[in-house]
Amino acid sequence: MKNKIVYISTLAILAITPGCKKYLEQLPDQRTEVNSPVKVAELLSTAYPRANYIPFLEAMSDNAEDKGTDVNALINRQPWFFQDVTNRDEDTPDFYWHSAYAAIAAANQALEVIDNATDQSAYAASRGEALVARAYAHFMLVTIFAKAYDPATAGKDPGIPYVTKTEKVVIEKYERKTVAYVYEQIEKDLLEGLSLIDDNSYTGAPAFHFTTKAAHAFASRFYLFKKEYAKVVQHANLTFVGTKALPYLRPVNTLYAQMERLVLQAEYTKATTKANLLLVETKSVWARDLVTNRYGCTPSLARNFIVANNVCGTGFDYSFYYSDPEDFFLPKFNELFIRVDQNANIGDPYDMVPLFSAEEVLFNRAEANTELGNFDAAIKDLNDFVSQRAVDYDPAEHNLTPDKISNYYQTLDIKAGLISTILDFKRMEFVFEGLRWFDILRHKLPVNHISFDGKTRLVLGPNDPRRMVQIPQEAQLSGLELNPR
């Protein structure tokens, strides 16, 4: 049987951008036969969404304020105003939708080849990667474009199409089904895939593939959304050798504190950095725009939730940089510009994005243990984190205790205090990475945006339908209903 790499799905094509049309026009001349384990493994390098969700999720969150000046780009302004983004280029919801379904189509193409292979055992590891990659792309889609998982309503809430087959017609019809159905399919793919992944099968840089560590990290996030806390702890433990997270954490208050900006910028998304469990290269201008966007993290906002002393008794030793009175950033992303014309300064910008990190898994475990009543275990994880972040760290002075947490948050409820600690630490750690939005969804946190002149106040409440990013208008051609507005 001859198989070709033709993994563009209807759902991807319907959200296609002008830049992507050029890519599609080149496909017929670039088709490659997929007829061996090596070729399938190569195909799976494209089974990860090559799009950046950070720009629009960060702008929608409470990490973004109106600076009053700077670049007022549509793709930054509309999310901040909780409006549907009309642009379809990189760093937009439409672009992410397209890229995610293109990645799913690649995974499905690989699985079809494997299913028709004579010796399927030779493809076992690739089957595992394909299934977990397919689960991940669908998870991101349902998280961004549907209502956050709620066991009481998930059986009724519209989901997103869960695509498991390669397409045989020009425009396939799909159903959104329900969030519960999508979660069932994600879990099925994730668990089957996890049992098959073989880290020894990866050549080159494993940080760009679902290794067992990365897959367990994904599982810890998935079950945190699903509120199955014992499973969060189980998969978080399996992420780290000997269940110990500390050796994987970024040394922010020691090595990172001594690095120059450009070195730190490169280090943060390096494949060899132990904290980076899964990386993906995305077509994006986030690395250059995060500083000059009109709607973003300001020095005054940063002073409130990052720079100031926190529950541990001191601040965290992040390396901040300012390029203007209102422009503030942490050096996390390093743009790679690839020229398409060697005789002109024309090309495409790419950013490396950490999809899963050791720090996130630590926080997932701490939150799950808190929900399970294992407060000592949660505090142990948080103190490991503090040891790598606190300025002039002194365990006797800076380690967390139940009393310290209760006093800081003015509560006798240690569980509530721990959850507040975790959410605050995560907000600091993942600023400019978009992950704050996931906590806003899970915990139904309101978001308030106030214009620079104070005349406009925007409130995104816990049940506001605008928390569901709008799916591409063209997806209606496949029979999909848009999200309510």
Image (cartoon, rainbow, N blue to C red):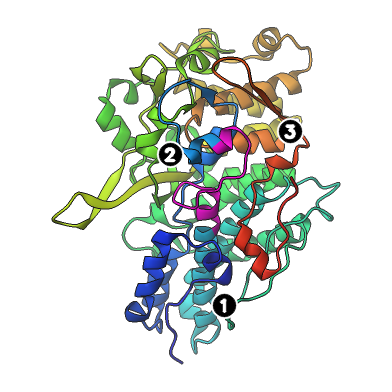
Residue 320 image position (x, y, % from top left): 38, 20
Tag 2 and tag 1, C-beta contact below 8 Å: no
Q: Report the magenta stretch's main SS.
A: loop
Q: Please determine whether, in this image, residue 181 is positioned above or below residue 151.
A: below
The answer to whether residue 128 shows anywhere in this view is: no
Left or right: where does residue 438 sit relative to residue 71? right
Q: Which mark is residue 432?
A: none
Residue 408 image position (x, y, % from top left): 66, 9
The answer to whether residue 350 shows anywhere in this view is: yes
Q: Could you say which is closer to the camera, residue 174 or residue 142? A: 174
Q: What's the magenta region?
A: 78-97
Left or right: where does residue 112 sit relative to residue 262? right
Give the spatial CA distance, label 3 vs label 2.
28 Å
Left or right: where does residue 248 sit relative to residue 479? left
Write down the residue under mark 2: 275
- Residue type indicated by callout 2: Ala
Q: Secondary structure at mark 1?
A: loop
Q: Please determine whether, in this image, residue 469 is positioned above or below residue 477.
A: above
| Disc with the residue nearer the chain's start (2 vs 1) | 1
Write down the residue under mark 1: 166
Q: Residue at x 60, y 76 (%)?
A: 171
Q: Secondary structure at mark 2?
A: loop
Write down the residue under mark 3: 444
